[in-house]
Image (cartoon, rainbow, N blue to C red):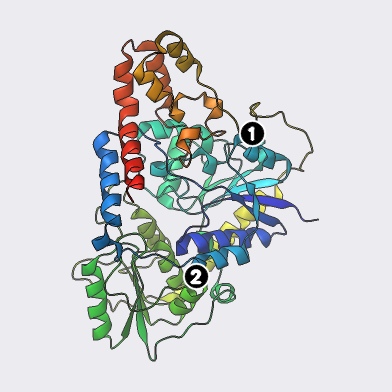
């Protein structure tokens, strides 16, 4: 029987890059003789950071406008089977993981745990599950190309949470050089390797194996795909296509309002591979579409998804990739030329050299995994499943003296009131559908409960923004 690896990454998202990176990393691990199951965990939105009412309500208002009839038509929605068939055909999964015990049980079933790739370590989307916080034996931890997605970690509290989680990994690698330097500085470790995104690890022949037939345009064409709608970008791409005597194929935007320029129906991941591999030119703001263009040696122009180069803009991953492969003048800027010739002979040679380094890292990491023991670990959570949850000691203490407080009654409804061990065990009955992950401000809240005499101040600072928004959401649902 083959040894089994549990892979923690984003999956089941209607996102091409997510689908491709999960498939590629699974494929790479299988090449070393392992069976691979993706950890069946679906990250839900949760109040990770303490935010003001204005910050939260802005998002709610935006969602409200998106649902209005006049705006509904321009938000693109994939058909159910566009991505579902891909995930069903190519992936196997662990048991669904929701409660603490679900995750903890994986320790006795898998010889190793790999997390990566994509932006699963993005500090703006912090979730300890993607750092494999539930794995008992740290020798079984392998990080392959997780991305921080940013050029700096601004939030100091996020830093405090991330450092001990990352430091547990026996084998540690990061996708971007920028992220690699950040991690080295955070941990004061020198054994942090900068490896290739798993999508880059597979050659064109490997990707062609899962490409799908689709009717292509007659003649040569430019393939245009932007995650975020930007009319100016798309118009520039169309203009350049006309100058090059190319037809223009514009795919729907998938992470914002759709573009009015889209002229091809939605594509499955396999069909998208076919479109890219046969294109004469590609214009995109998608990191993984750029990666596939490089694999297929297609000329491309990389546009910035975020107009600002701030620390959280996520532009660094594209810049890092182009520097790494010595691809110059491929990023779009005002007045730039679309006629730059990429020396793909040199690029492919350089890529192959770096593939070997990344492949060696993964091979060594997998070969170093210890023999799986059948030890019955003590249960992480003694609660029944589903766990009824219990209030934290600080909260219980306040309840004993202010049980009749209207503020306390409201606060008791939120997961923030739970004991630390229950955060990943229970979705409170009146909060079903909301993620009960511990927010980063949990410890500050606990201190406030113990030291702040005025309970109303605690409510207004920590609970009110989420409480009022929750009420608005419920009201909107009732009136739909």
Residue 406, quarter of the rendered image = top left
Residue 310 position, x and y percent, is 27, 48
What is the distance, in whole Å, between disc 1 and disc 2 at their CAs? Answer: 38 Å
Q: Secondary structure at mark 2?
A: helix
Residue 108 position, x and y percent, is 73, 40
Nearer the viewer's eye, disc 1 or disc 2?
1
Q: Quadrant of the N terminus?
A: bottom right
Per the image, the residue denoted by label 1 is 385
Which of the two discs, 1 and 2, labels the residue nearer the N terminus?
Answer: 2
Indicate left or right for 344 with 1 as reference. Answer: left
Indicate left or right for 334 with 206 as reference. Answer: left
**Is 194 rendered above or below residue 414?**
below
Q: Secondary structure at mark 1?
A: loop
Residue 345 position, x and y percent, is 46, 77
**Is 45 rendered above or below residue 344?**
above
Per the image, the residue denoted by label 2 is 269
Nearest to the observer: residue 397 or residue 147: 397
Instruction: Identify the residue shown where x is 72% and y is 59%.
Output: 33
Instruction: Identify the residue shown where x is 44% and y is 53%.
Output: 176
Residue located farthest toward the left when viewing the structure as drawn: 335
**Is 72 rendered above or below residue 192?**
below
Nearest to the observer: residue 301 or residue 358: 301
**Dot 2 crowding, Cα within 10 Å, few <14, some 14–19, many 20+:** many
Indicate left or right for 349 with 404 as reference. Answer: right
Indicate left or right for 338 with 99 as reference. Answer: left
Residue 412 position, x and y percent, is 43, 23
Nearest to the observer: residue 470 or residue 295: 470
Instruction: Identify the residue shown where x is 47% and y is 42%.
Output: 433
């Amino acid at each position: 029987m083959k040894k089994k690896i549990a892979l923690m990454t984003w999956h089941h998202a209607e996102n091409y890059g997510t689908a491709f990176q999960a498939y590629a990393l699974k494929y790479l691990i299988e090449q070393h003789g392992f069976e691979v199951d993706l950890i069946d965990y679906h990250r839900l939105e949760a109040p990770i950071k303490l935010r003001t009412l204005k910050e939260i309500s802005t998002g709610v208002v935006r969602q409200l406008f998106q649902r209005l009839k006049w705006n509904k038509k321009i938000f693109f929605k994939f058909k159910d089977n566009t991505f579902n068939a891909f995930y069903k055909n190519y992936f196997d999964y662990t048991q669904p993981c929701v409660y603490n015990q679900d995750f903890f049980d994986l320790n006795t079933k898998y010889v190793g745990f790999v997390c990566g790739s994509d932006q699963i370590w993005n500090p703006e989307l912090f979730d300890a599950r993607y750092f494999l916080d539930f794995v008992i034996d740290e020798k079984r931890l392998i990080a392959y190309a997780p991305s921080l997605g940013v050029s700096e970690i601004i939030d100091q509290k996020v830093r405090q949470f991330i450092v001990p989680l990352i430091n547990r990994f026996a084998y540690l690698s990061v996708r971007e050089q920028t992220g690699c330097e950040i991690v080295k500085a955070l941990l004061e470790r020198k054994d942090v390797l900068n490896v290739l995104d798993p999508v880059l690890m597979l050659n064109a022949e490997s990707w062609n194996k899962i490409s799908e037939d689709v009717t292509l345009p007659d003649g040569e064409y430019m393939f245009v795909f932007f995650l975020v709608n930007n009319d100016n970008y798309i118009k520039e791409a169309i203009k350049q296509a006309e100058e090059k005597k190319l037809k223009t194929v514009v795919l729907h935007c998938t992470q914002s309002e759709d573009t009015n320029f889209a002229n091809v129906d939605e594509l499955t991941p396999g069909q998208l591979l076919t479109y890219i591999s046969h294109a004469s030119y590609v214009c995109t703001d998608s990191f993984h579409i750029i990666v596939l263009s490089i694999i297929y040696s297609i000329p491309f122009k990389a546009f910035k998804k975020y107009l600002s180069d701030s620390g959280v803009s996520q532009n660094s991953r594209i810049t890092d990739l182009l520097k790494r492969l010595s691809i110059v003048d491929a990023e779009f800027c005002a007045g730039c030329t679309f006629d730059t010739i990429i020396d793909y002979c040199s690029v492919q040679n350089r890529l192959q050299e770096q593939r070997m380094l990344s492949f060696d890292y993964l091979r060594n990491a997998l070969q170093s995994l210890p023999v799986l023991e059948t030890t019955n670990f003590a249960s992480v959570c003694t609660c029944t499943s589903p766990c009824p949850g219990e209030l934290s000691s600080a909260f219980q203490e306040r309840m004993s003296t202010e049980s009749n407080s209207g503020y306390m009654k409201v606060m008791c409804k939120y997961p923030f009131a739970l004991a630390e061990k229950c955060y990943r065990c229970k979705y409170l009955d009146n909060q079903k559908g909301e993620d009960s992950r511990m927010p980063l401000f949990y410890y500050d809240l606990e201190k406030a409960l113990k030291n702040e005499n005025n309970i109303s101040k605690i409510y207004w600072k920590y609970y009110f923004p989420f409480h009022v928004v929750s009420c608005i959401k419920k009201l909107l649902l009732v009136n739909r």
